[in-house]
Amino acid sequence: MLKMRPRLTLTFAATLAVTLAACAPAAAQAPAASGAARAAGPTVAYVVRPSDPSRYNPVERLALDASLRPVSRTPVNLGCSRVHVANTGELVCLTQSKPGSPGRFTPNTTYLYSPAMTPLASFERPVSNMPSRARISADGRYLATTTFTSGHSYLGVGGTQFSTETLISQRADGATAQDIQKWAISWKGQPVTALDLNLWGVTFDPRQSDHFFVTVYFKGTPYLGEGSVANRAIKVLRPNVECPSLSPDGQRIAFKRRVSATAWAPAVLDLATQKERVLQVPNSVDDQIEWLDDHTLVYEVATTPLFDTPKFNLYTVDLAAAQPQQVLWLEDARSPTFVRAGP
């Protein structure tokens, strides 16, 4: 099939309303070859396929080959705006669709599914307004969701154009959800009490699920925050980090770095050295980046053809390559998540 080059990028929130639009069938693409040796990676992934006009954001299960390329995509009976899966196989689904009935709309709700993709009766949590981010810890113990409570874009400055709600709950009971904006948040030893305070984009430590990172936004600037569920506390670390995502080995954070008033680039922070690396890619990346393996990023890019509806494709960047390049990984897909053998 013909593949159109992206011409115009959209933010994640601006494109949520059009994810039911039809588009051409997908095609898996092999990632660029790299001279770096790869450790064993995931063999199973899940994505949301946004273009199916007959269903609400159907979820698909991908089989990956040894080069981490998708070789098949099989529908499962779920419809989700965002998905994320634990190493144990449980999947969190942020959705407007009833379990088992992807075409039946309901208020925004977080559901947890077993590895067999059956809903767990112990977990069902309503959420406010428009879905944005979802994460589950590697051990399946904690879940986190972010939704917009007002405004539909992270492009606003000074807190005047958007407001978020970020909740963390235990797997055993969705009713225990905690609004982490109400926890103790500090910057340089002082409490953060700014009127424009917002938090979004939790990422759990794969080695210790109580430990997490999150975007903390105040006084018009996004910061990287480090938190503890047990202590209900978040310490702000450094500015200009949005939507952090820990690598499978827990050593680096991928995030989106603002490069203009309306665009972001993927970036990586080494936690040991605090060295930051911003990657040069042709599209704005308004997504919470995932890791395919310990040196390969995968993220969603939205594009708008001149006379058609927005398209959502997944791209990879291999950090181990001599000159990392953005490469198409899977067409007509978003919200990638991987079942890994372990931390």
Image: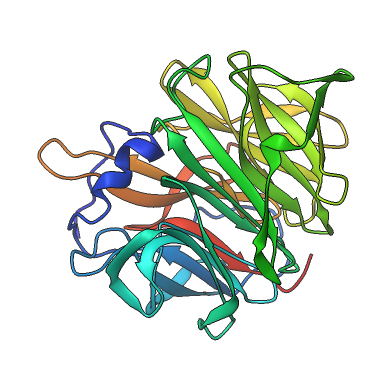
> Quadrant location of residue 231?
top right
Compared with 6, 93 (above or below) is: below
Q: Is residue 246 left or right of residue 130?
A: right
Compared with 72, 263 (above or below) is: above
Q: Is residue 30 visible?
A: no
Nearer to the camera, 218 or 174: 174
Rendered location of residue 227, percent (x, y) = 80, 41
Q: Is residue 153 left or right of residue 317?
A: left
Compared with 330, 167 (above or below) is: above
- In percent of the image, x 41 and y 72: which residue is there? 60
Instruction: In the displayed orientation, state which residue is furthest to the front.
Output: 175
Compared with 144, 259 (above or below) is: above
Rendered location of residue 34, percent (x, y) = 60, 52
Quarter holding the C terminus is bottom right
Q: Is residue 182 left or right of residue 321?
A: right
Nearer to the camera, 16 or 261: 16
- In percent of the image, x 58 and y 19: which residue is there? 196
Q: Is residue 131 left or right of residue 258?
A: left
Rendered location of residue 172, percent (x, y) = 71, 72
Quarter holding the N terminus is bottom left
> Quadrant location of residue 277?
top right
Nearer to the camera, 7 or 318: 7
Rendered location of residue 257, percent (x, y) = 58, 27
